[in-house]
Image (spheres, rainbow, N blue to C red):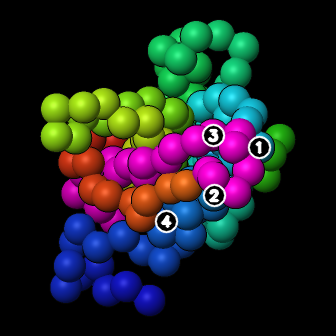
Amino acid sequence: MTNHNSNPSAVSPELDEMVCDLIGYMLDELAEGRDPGTAACAEDEADGRIEAVFTDDGEEACLEAAQAFITDNARGNAEEGLRAIDRYAIACTGAVEIGGAYRDAVLVSFYERALPTGYSAYVLYENPGAGDRFGWSDPEPAGEEPALI
């Protein structure tokens, strides 16, 4: 288990697993040629989890809906058996500029209460829906973000 006292910006194994699950979902959908939408996932300290995918509106509206999903459930969701959110992640598709060119990417932002700030990362991908020709990179850090909770 990560010792947050010795490294306050270290991501816990639980948050790492959540982010990997979300990236995996996004890449699986893209590999099949489906629109993964904007996905949000949140967990409490006891590993209670809620998830949602937003696809019915434009990209910006879906991102705003995912962010609202996190903030609206920040204190918990009794119907879903979720206590106050301890960690969350949001993922969507977009692009990043690398070497003067824009590349398709899965963008993910994440946070947990033990961290001093939220963080973001991206995973490049190519050839969505192209079967064996679909490819992706390892995740790369993209910087800090303000926390939603």
Residue mark closest to the camera, 2 vs 3? 3
Residue range highlighted in magenta: 113-134
First in sequence: mark 2 or mark 1? 2
- CB under 8 Å between discs 4 and 1: no
Q: Note whether 64 is above or below 97 in the view shown.
A: above
Quickly name the residue at label 2: 24
Q: CA distance from mark 2 to mark 3?
A: 14 Å
Q: Residue at x 83, y 41 (%)?
A: 79
Quickly name the residue at label 4: 15
Q: Quadrant of residue 138?
A: bottom left
- The local crowd at label 4, few if under 14, some if 14 to 19, many if 20 or more residues have their Cα within 10 Å, is some
Q: Amino acid at mark 1?
A: Glu
Quickly name the residue at label 1: 32
- The local crowd at label 1, few if under 14, some if 14 to 19, many if 20 or more residues have their Cα within 10 Å, is some
First in sequence: mark 1 or mark 3? 1
Q: Whole-percent x and y of residue 83?
A: 65, 53
Q: CA distance from mark 4 to mark 1?
A: 26 Å
Residue 53 at least partly seen: no
Q: Secondary structure at mark 2?
A: helix
Q: Secondary structure at mark 1?
A: loop
Quickly name the residue at label 3: 128
Q: Quadrant of the N terminus?
A: bottom left
Q: Residue at x 37, y 85 (%)?
A: 2
Q: Residue at x 55, y 55 (%)?
A: 135
Q: Note whether 66 is above or below 87 in the view shown.
A: above
Q: Amino acid at mark 2?
A: Gly
Q: Secondary structure at mark 4?
A: helix
Q: Amino acid at mark 3?
A: Pro
